[in-house]
Image: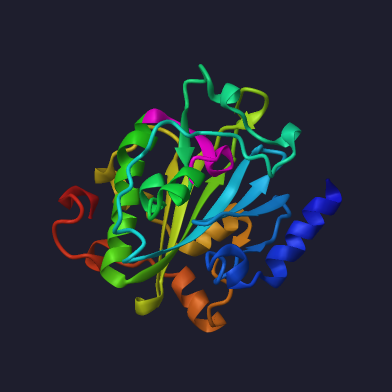
Amino acid sequence: MKLLTLLAGLFLSFGTSAEECNGHLEFTIKNKQSTIDQVLCSDGYAVGYSYYYKAPMWVQYRLTKESVAPNNGRGGNPFKEDDRIPEEFRASLWDYKYSGFDRGHMAPRAAMDETPTLRDKSFLLSNMTPQEAKLNQRGWADLEEYVRDIATKHEEIYVVTGALFEGVNRTIGRGIYIPSHLYKVIYIPSKEQMLAFMIPNEAFDIDDLDKMQVKPALLERHSGLDFFQNIVNSKEKLMEKTKINYCDLLGDGHLPQEAC
């Protein structure tokens, strides 16, 4: 276990070539707390997975105007275990059954449906955390749509979606930890801007989005990660300490007035 954690830390600290994770780790994440035991590369996204929490700590993915345009639909019910993870550390369908929690995508299916194969890989349980239904099916889904709109408007973005485990630890099934919060950090290269949201794992409406915006630097302190560390350091530090007006990214009509 310690060896795997060390190797994962080295993997993240020294970076991975864009080709190894299909470009999704072009701007790498530095893990400062050794919580990641395995890095998983899928066609549409990369995952930093924790054996202790039996859940993804983060996923990172690159979205473009072209990649978010297709819509290949949900297609059946293809949730399945990820056999790249040792069996004792991975989630199963049984763990979620009767748990009262949704299998919440970290890399969203609607952003991963450029092809049916890519879409189906987004249903691996290594890409899921237990989420409250009124978060997952409402405000969180609206936020994911907003992120896709940013990709369409600004041609290319990089997204980190992550889970935080703070306060009282709760689990489902055979020890799958329930996140206390979910977050998103979005980097928009064309504007040299970064945007971050931190949302409790409870009922959430997109009208309250303004209350959930945080500076990326705050999320780095909570998560123990250094986001997008390949950006020129002076620009990265400035972006991490700035809260931008997220409604200005798309113009009027893309979010409810209350959300701005």
Measured as percent of width and height from the top left, residue 14 is found at 71, 72
Q: Residue furthest top?
A: 98
37, above or below 191, in the image: above
Q: Image quadrant for the C terminus?
A: bottom left
Relative side of 130 to 112, left or right: right
User: Per the image, is 123 magenta?
Assistant: yes
Measured as percent of width and height from the top left, residue 160 is found at 49, 58
Given residues 209 and 30, the one toward you in this image is: 30
18, above or below 38, in the image: below
Measured as percent of width and height from the top left, residue 218 is found at 51, 59
User: Per the image, is 239 magenta?
Assistant: no
Relative side of 127 to 251, left or right: right
Measured as percent of width and height from the top left, residue 57 is found at 60, 48
129, above or below 224, in the image: above
Residue at 29%, 45% in the rendered image: 142
Q: Which residues are magenta?
A: 122-133
Determine the image quadrant of residue 146: bottom left
Residue at 66%, 69% in the rendered image: 16
Residue at 65%, 47% in the rendered image: 49
Residue at 30%, 71% in the rendered image: 154
Q: Residue furthest front?
A: 116
Given residues 217 and 155, the one toward you in this image is: 155
